[in-house]
Image (tube, grey):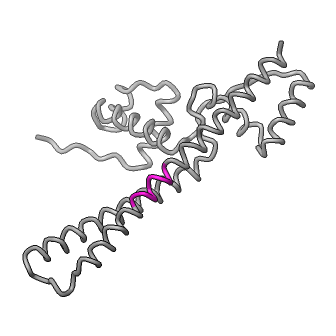
Amino acid sequence: MSQMKRLTATEKMEIVREAAESVSTSDLAERFGVSQRAIQYTLKADAERQKDTAVATAAVTVKLTPEELEALDAVFSAAGIETRTEGLRRLIQAAGGTFVPDVALAAEMARYRALLNEVGNGVAQLTKRMAEANRTGQAAAEFSDLRLAQMRGLARFVLDSADEIDLLVRRRRDAMQLAATAALREFAHAAE
């Protein structure tokens, strides 16, 4: 079996660029000395990377009257939204039910929740090991019932904190979605 050529990062970028210019996968495969499947995997991987990193790849153009634009800017300004692009992106996302107003905050909270879960799980495992040691008589003096109760309490606190963070993020997202829906209704009524 012949060895397949590995594409370099530069070659992958070139494949993505040329595919966007409508160069066929068979032509790209021949040019780069790989299979058509390798080209398809490269294009799929790039599409997934763009989706995962939230790379904006499409533009929407809207024509408004000067009065409509002024009203739109006023709504965005009142909401603390600094750019029209961000404001329109939020409105479009709200219309689809996937309003994510603060991606950085949501990601940070998800990371924090995951870390708390790890700590809580670690404490729970430690508590199990301590209880097992007590049952077998290995370290009865070191792991008193009071210490076991304290460890269980700590594990419960950490896991409950992680759940509270998740609930907080969900409530904030839902509240902002309601605000965006109200703004969309206001725009719809203003257009009438």
Farthest residue to the left: give it.
Answer: 136
Q: Residue at x 53, y 28 (%)?
A: 21
Could you tell me how many numbered marks the image carries? 0
Which secondary structure class fits the magenta region best?
helix
Does the magenta run of residues contain 87?
no
Q: Based on the displayed image, in which of its 4 quarters is residue 125 positioned?
A: bottom left
Taking the view exactly as shown, the residue that stands out farthest to the right is: 67
**Up/down of 5 relative to 185, above or below:** below
Nearer to us in this view, 113 or 46: 113
Residue placed most toward the observer, 160 or 64: 160
Q: Residue at x 73, y 28 (%)?
A: 182
| 124 sits left or right of 156 in the view | left
For residue 82, say whether it is visible: no
Q: Is residue 191 left or right of residue 166?
A: right
Seen in the image, is 180 located left or right of residue 146?
right
Residue 140 % position (x, y): 15, 83
Is 148 placed left or right of 166 in the picture? left
On the image, which quarter does residue 158 sit in? bottom left
Query: Quick one: 50 or 181, which is closer to the camera?
Result: 181
Does residue 109 lie above or below 119 as drawn? above
Quarter holding the C terminus is top right
The image shows residue 176 at horizontal and vertical percentages of: 65, 39
Query: In this rendering, does residue 21 appear at all?
Result: yes
* Residue in the image at 33% along x and 74% along y: 150
| Residue in front for this viewpoint, 189 or 93 | 189
Q: Position of residue 92 (x, y in %)?
A: 65, 28
Residue range corresponding to the magenta coloring: 159-166
Measured from the top left, where is residue 69 in percent x and y? 86, 28
Q: Residue at image x 57%, y 43%?
A: 171
- Compared to residue 184, the image places residue 146 above or below, namely below
User: Quadrant location of the N terminus?
Assistant: top left
